[in-house]
Image (spheres, coloured by chain):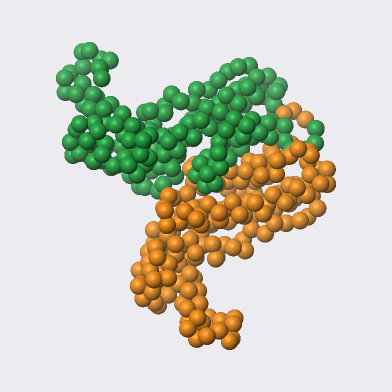
Chain colours: A orange, B green
Amino acid sequence: MTSPEPVAPPLRRRGERMRRAVLQAAVDLLSSQGLAGATVGAVARAAGVHETSVYRRWGTRENLILDALTTELDAALPVPDTGRVRDDLLAFFSALARLLATAQGGALLRLSVERDDTLEDRRGPYWSERLDRAVVMVRRGVERGELAADTDPGLLIEAVSGPLFVRVLLSGAPLDDALVRELVDLALDGARPR
Amino acid sequence: MTSPEPVAPPLRRRGERMRRAVLQAAVDLLSSQGLAGATVGAVARAAGVHETSVYRRWGTRENLILDALTTELDAALPVPDTGRVRDDLLAFFSALARLLATAQGGALLRLSVERDDTLEDRRGPYWSERLDRAVVMVRRGVERGELAADTDPGLLIEAVSGPLFVRVLLSGAPLDDALVRELVDLALDGARPR
């Protein structure tokens, strides 16, 4: 792994290189063995570093895993702008469903709902920041007259994303494109006779 | 506490009386001190029984807490039948929101999403059984012509309940009657201009 900053001081480059190796090892272990397999010892061995170095940098196993997953998944949820609100919502929530259906996405969500004081500041925000960015799709739909002027953008995002999260966390029911389509259409058109 | 079965053998009555005292102590501790405060030791002390008796009966702390919460909350979600689908949905989901906003309801939901092999068979079903019962409200709405004939009852229930669960588990945002009303109306009428 090469550093993108050629003039960085050797110590920082070593630190950054170590950081990336550890995070990559954590993601690989999470993918292959799930949350339970990604112990600090296993991650340190896979990354070729001392376990104490991992604890010095991340403090706890949960912080390490959270850092690994958020770094890995950061680019996974782009907000589309197709010019039609239904297409935007379908693209965004299909990507969310695919993300949640992966081992890493499921692990990150599970980790996000576990109570742990050392993580208090960082877990909730990961998902709410991503959903907050999606609100702009609904606002554009209102501006184009596709949606009622009094539409609550955050509420619409919650109504479509909520069942996806709950299927992963609670029911274990599958996430697929048909589900996303049904949820988007229910939020757009409602269940009343047309 | 008196037993409702006057002819039960003394040994069974003692067992049932002990069971109820332990479950009530667990609910009281959960309400006053949250999940972390309801240790087996604390519950046993509050109920006036030996800790070993609790372990003999429930096996694990998680089983004990789950038994306490499901017993306590079993009657909390009646399915209404007012003759109008919107009123039924508002009553049912307002009760769900109130339940989830209590210390016990929140604790039960959190416990339901924690992975634990000893609980595998009983946790998910608690919530899905209650939501399954709610499906009949939607079916009656379809039969009365209030909802489109192709309405997916389970999906509508998921679209309203999902955000309530997610607010408790992930965002910590408040659950109130206005939120329930907005979610029900979105699921019924959609966000398109009327």
Residue B86 lies, with reference to residue A61, above or below; the image says above
* Residue B62 position in % (x across, y down): 33, 41
Q: Residue at x 47, y 78 (%)?
A: A15
In the rendered structure, the answer to whether residue B18 lies left or right of residue B185 reads left
* Residue B17 position in % (x across, y down): 23, 24
Residue B144 in view in this figure? yes
In the rendered structure, the answer to whether residue B57 lies left or right of residue B127 reads left
Residue B40 lies, with reference to residue B92, above or below; the image says below
Q: Nearer the viewer, residue B160 or B150?
A: B160
In the rendered structure, the answer to whether residue B178 lies left or right of residue A137 reads left
Q: Nearer the viewer, residue B98 or A106?
A: B98
Q: Residue at x 34, y 32 (%)?
A: B27
> Looking at the rendering, in which quadrant would you find the C terminus of chain A?
top right
* Residue B122 position in % (x across, y down): 39, 37
Count how many numbered circles sit on residues in the image.
Answer: 0
* Residue A156 position in % (x across, y down): 67, 42
Q: Residue at x 83, y 43 (%)?
A: A145
Q: Nearer the viewer, residue B25 or A93?
A: B25
In the rendered structure, the answer to whether residue B68 lies left or right of residue B184 reads left
Residue A32 quadrant: bottom left
Q: Residue at x 56, y 28 (%)?
A: B94
Residue A173 in view in this figure? no
